[in-house]
Amino acid sequence: MGNIFWSLLATALFFLEGCAVNGMANTHQPCSEKLYGTTWNLRMIDNDRIDLKHPATIHFDDDGKISGYSGCNHYFAKAELTATTITFGPVGSTRRYCMGEAGKVEQRLFSLFKGKKWWNFDEKKRLQIFDDEHRLVFERAE
């Protein structure tokens, strides 16, 4: 009986492996593959709603790079993705001077694109990138 239990548990864990969307595991497509080739618009930093004239974005390339628009400058970086984490390399960007809300968003965004973070999709299928203190929320660009 013990061997059957462990076999069933191992099989269940195999099929449930992947990222969670509202507590349910995705068994159809690796979650990181859903990010490749997609662009996401920044909607929230922590609990602050972000509403810029030209939205800040993040785009995931399948070669381990990200790029996007910060609200003021274009940026790029390497990003190592696993099923639950994303590790950002140093961010490079154009050097346009940013004032006002766009400048503040850029500073906050770049400060959070450092080191290892967790990521998942929330119940509204928004991309969340977060650590113990901060959270970025992105919606898929149309």
Image (cartoon, rainbow, N blue to C red):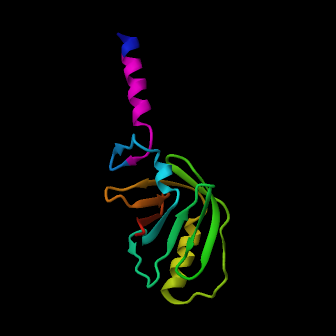
- Residue 75 drawn at (x, y percent): 62, 73
Q: How many numbered discs, if any?
A: 0
| Image: 26 above or below 139 | above
Quarter of the image for residue 110 reads bottom right
Looking at the image, residue 97 sits to the left or right of residue 122; the answer is right
Q: Residue at x 50, y 50 (%)?
A: 32
Q: Is residue 109 magenta?
A: no
Segment colored magenta: 5-20
108 or 21: nearer the eye? 21
- Residue 72 drawn at (x, y percent): 56, 83
Q: Does the magenta stretch include residue 7?
A: yes
36 or 117: nearer the eye? 36
| Image: 11 above or below 43 | above
- Residue 53 drawn at (x, y percent): 44, 85
| Image: 139 above or below 93 | above
Q: Residue at x 38, y 28 (%)?
A: 12
Q: Residue at x 36, y 56 (%)?
A: 122
